[in-house]
Image: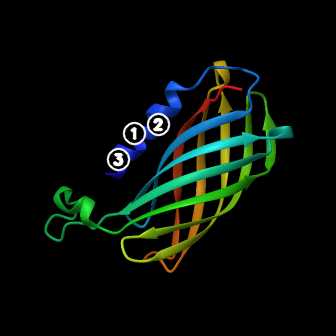
């Protein structure tokens, strides 16, 4: 269900885009691995202001897996039945480094969401490095730490990679 929703949203955003090198708004999709035994996907809209500072409005889904007791690997049959969360949030990203065709931002934000049982709130802190490509596209990597209040995993920390697609004016 969640996979179909994310793919549908990505399809709608992609079909409505026009490449524009001077545009500072992007739709991004990133995937990451987090400690301990978690993976996440983030779909976001980023509005870049002056000097590469930005506001990001995001939706995030995270799944935590258990290792198989007999072999020590991920059990595929129980992967989707494990602990899952989703959240919607906002982050401010002040630019801290500028280089030729790249820039780095701190990422400070908050989110509200749920797991399968209860309400969650999150505080998000991290660093994001962006690399500019032709046509306004960007690729990025993030180092991130999330504090999930009332979640099964209080602290999540890890890395993510993704792509940013320019939106039309």
Q: Quadrant of residue 72?
A: bottom left
The residue carrying mark 2 is: 10
Residue at the image position 44 percent from the left and 32 percent from the top = 11
Looking at the picture, tell me which residue is in the foreground, 136 or 45: 45
CA–CA distance between discs 1 and 2?
A: 5 Å
Q: In the picture shown, does residue 93 fall above or below 163?
A: below
Nearer the N terminus, badge 3 or badge 2? 3
Give the farthest residue toward the bottom.
150
Q: Residues within 10 Å of mark 3 (few under 14, many from 20)?
A: few
User: Which x, y percent locates residue 147?
Assistant: 58, 72
Give yes or no for contact between labels 3 and 1 (Cβ–Cβ under 8 Å): yes
User: Which x, y percent locates residue 47?
Assistant: 72, 41
CA–CA distance between discs 3 and 1?
A: 6 Å
Q: In the picture shown, does residue 74 fall above or below 121?
A: above
CA–CA distance between discs 3 and 2?
A: 11 Å
Colour mode?
A: rainbow
Where, quadrant-wise, is the C terminus in this rendering? Answer: top right
Secondary structure beneath dot 1 equals helix
Give yes or no for contact between labels 1 and 2 (Cβ–Cβ under 8 Å): yes
Secondary structure beneath dot 3 equals helix
Q: Residues within 10 Å of mark 2 (few under 14, many from 20)?
A: some
Tag count in the figure? 3
Residue at the image position 73 percent from the left and 44 percent from the top = 104
Horizontal side, residue 78 vs residue 110: left or right: left
Give the farthest residue toward the left.
70
Secondary structure beneath dot 2 equals helix
Residue at the image position 80 percent from the left and 45 percent from the top = 53
User: Which x, y percent locates residue 23?
Assistant: 74, 27
In the drawing, what numbered circle is on residue 3?
3
User: Which x, y percent locates residue 7?
Assistant: 39, 39
In the drawing, what numbered circle is on residue 7?
1
């Amino acid at each position: 269900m969640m996979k179909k929703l994310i793919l549908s949203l990505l399809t709608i955003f992609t079909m409505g885009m026009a490449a524009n090198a001077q545009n500072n708004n992007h739709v991004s999709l990133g995937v990451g691995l987090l400690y301990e035994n978690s993976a996440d996907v983030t779909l976001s809209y980023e509005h870049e202001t002056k000097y590469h500072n930005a506001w990001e409005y995001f939706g995030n889904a995270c799944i935590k897996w258990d290792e198989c007791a007999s072999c020590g690997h991920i059990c595929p049959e129980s992967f989707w039945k494990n602990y899952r969360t989703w959240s919607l949030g906002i982050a401010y990203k002040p630019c801290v480094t500028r280089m030729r065709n790249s820039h780095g931002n701190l990422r400070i934000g908050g989110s509200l969401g749920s797991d399968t049982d209860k309400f969650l709130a999150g505080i998000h802190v991290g660093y994001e490095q962006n690399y500019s490509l032709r046509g306004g596209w960007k690729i990025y990597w993030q180092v991130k730490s999330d504090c999930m209040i009332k979640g099964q995993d209080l602290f999540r920390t890890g890395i993510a990679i993704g792509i940013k697609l320019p939106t039309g004016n």
